């Protein structure tokens, strides 16, 4: 596993921060946001050193989202102890999701075009902007020559990438797939655009308190950036090379609400079916679920409807299962969110610690489950679920299981 978020670089530092209830949300520094309704975000800053994984001369040729992807992938491959290039490169694939891709590059390109004309367009603008080059650059770096795809599925992109990688490995098509998500959309256009649909929190006076999933006073999500990557292998392949196995993916569900461009279906039907399909593939009963990492964006409708879907699916067990939204600390990483939250789900199984939902201070009667308010809880977890939902009604869910 490998990751970069506003909480730091690396799985270890991220896990320590998230289980301590630390918020990485702060005032935007990447551009002057003084004229914006929202002036806060989860920026990657402290401890991020791409030079450890990317030659200095290449940095200027890469968009920020590509840098995040390469750094998270580098940690992931190191962590896995995988020899690269692999002996059989066509049995090794990569799937990386991103909701928007190199948006900062596109914004700069438009500015140059308007000010200086078409002959001065940045020569690397296209390669820095397109999403498929996130997995493509990782393939070039590590010699993976098998299935290589960029997934665009808005806020479900990272989860969808991992789910599709799970399919390729479980069906025997590939032995190894590096999968995850990356995003770098703390940009003027993105903040303005998400603000225009009233999706963002405007709690600028106290950034660390802005992301408050399931709280009665929540007022929108906090935009964030970063990347998360996981290395998936068949059991036989992992065992043959003596790899450390942290958890098993046992189920994946994907649906669409077919309801509205940005609002979730008020019945929660699409979310319900995504989780149900993942549980059916995993062949698990609600009684064995030990943790749910909720999508939990801190928007009014999402939190209510995710709660409704969980209740419908789990019945009385819904009140027993610990739930948390780590977005309360990381903010919403859009296409990278599901990948980062998948790692937190695996770490919950490994370490027996439920991360908290911070800033949960005021009871919302429609959100009445156990959201692990404000402090981490020690608990042995055998099975964890990670949910992701997106604009367009896309829903995706992964089920993880511990290994003995």
Image (cartoon, rainbow, N blue to C red):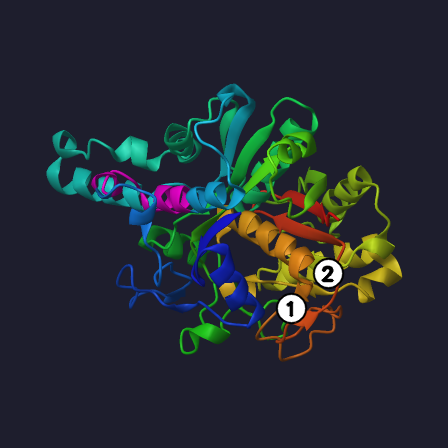
Tell me where the magenta segment starts and ends, as one range: 57-71
Asked whether the beta carbons under mark 2 and mark 1 sit within 8 Å of each other, the answer is yes
Disc 1 marks which residue?
214
Residue 8 rendering spot, x and y as whole percentages? 42, 61
Label 2: which secondary element: helix
Q: Is residue 7 left or right of residue 240?
A: left
Label 1: which secondary element: loop
Label at residue 18: none
Q: Residue 63 sits in which quadrant? A: top left
Residue 308 higher or lower than 145, as above or below: below
Q: Is residue 265 left or right of residue 11?
A: right
Residue 345 rendering spot, x and y as whole percentages? 64, 54
Residue appearing at x 67%, y 65% in the figure: 354
Residue 114 higher or lower than 327, as above or below: above
Residue 355 rendering spot, x and y as whole percentages? 62, 66
Residue appearing at x 58%, y 73% in the figure: 358
Disc 2 marks which residue?
307
Badge 2 density bin: few <14, some 14–19, many ≥20, Cα 10 Å: many
Task: Specify whether residue 67 is painted magenta.
Answer: yes
Q: CA distance from mark 2 to mark 1?
A: 9 Å
């Amino acid at each position: 596993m490998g990751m970069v978020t506003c909480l730091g670089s690396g799985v270890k530092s991220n896990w320590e921060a998230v289980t301590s209830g630390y918020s990485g949300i702060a005032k935007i520094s990447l551009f002057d946001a003084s004229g914006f309704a929202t002036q806060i975000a989860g920026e990657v800053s402290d401890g991020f050193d791409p030079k450890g994984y990317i030659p200095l001369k290449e940095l200027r040729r890469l968009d920020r989202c590509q840098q995040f992807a390469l750094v998270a992938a580098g940690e992931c491959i190191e962590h896995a102890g995988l020899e690269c290039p692999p002996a059989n490169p066509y049995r090794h694939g990569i799937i990386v999701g991103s909701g928007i891709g190199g948006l900062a590059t596109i914004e700069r390109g438009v500015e140059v075009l308007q000010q200086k004309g078409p002959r001065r367009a940045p020569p690397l603008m296209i390669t820095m902007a397109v999403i498929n080059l996130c997995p493509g650059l990782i393939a070039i770096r590590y010699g993976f020559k098998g299935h290589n795809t960029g997934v665009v599925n808005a806020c479900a992109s990272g989860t969808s990438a991992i789910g599709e990688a799970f399919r390729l490995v479980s069906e025997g098509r590939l032995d190894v797939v590096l999968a995850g998500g990356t995003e770098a959309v703390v940009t003027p256009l993105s903040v303005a655009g998400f603000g225009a649909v009233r999706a963002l929190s405007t709690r600028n006076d106290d950034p660390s308190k802005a992301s408050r999933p399931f709280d009665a006073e929540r007022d929108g999500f906090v935009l964030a950036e970063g990347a998360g990557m996981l290395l998936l292998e068949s059991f036989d392949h992992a065992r043959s090379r003596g790899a450390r196995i942290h958890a098993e993916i046992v189920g994946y569900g994907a649906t669409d609400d077919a309801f509205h461009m940005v609002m979730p279906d008020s019945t929660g039907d699409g979310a319900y079916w995504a989780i149900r399909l993942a549980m059916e593939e995993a062949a698990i009963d609600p009684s064995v679920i030990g943790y749910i990492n909720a999508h939990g964006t801190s928007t009014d409708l999402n939190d209510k409807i995710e709660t409704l879907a969980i209740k419908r699916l789990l019945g009385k067990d819904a009140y027993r299962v610990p739930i948390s939204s780590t977005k309360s600390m990381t903010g919403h990483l859009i296409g990278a969110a599901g990948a980062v939250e998948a790692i937190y789900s695996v770490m919950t199984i490994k370490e027996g610690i439920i991360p908290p939902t911070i800033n949960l201070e005021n009871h919302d009667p429609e959100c009445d489950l156990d959201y692990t308010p404000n402090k981490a809880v020690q608990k042995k977890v055998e099975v964890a679920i990670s949910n992701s939902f997106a604009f367009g009604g896309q829903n995706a869910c992964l089920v993880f299981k511990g290994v003995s």
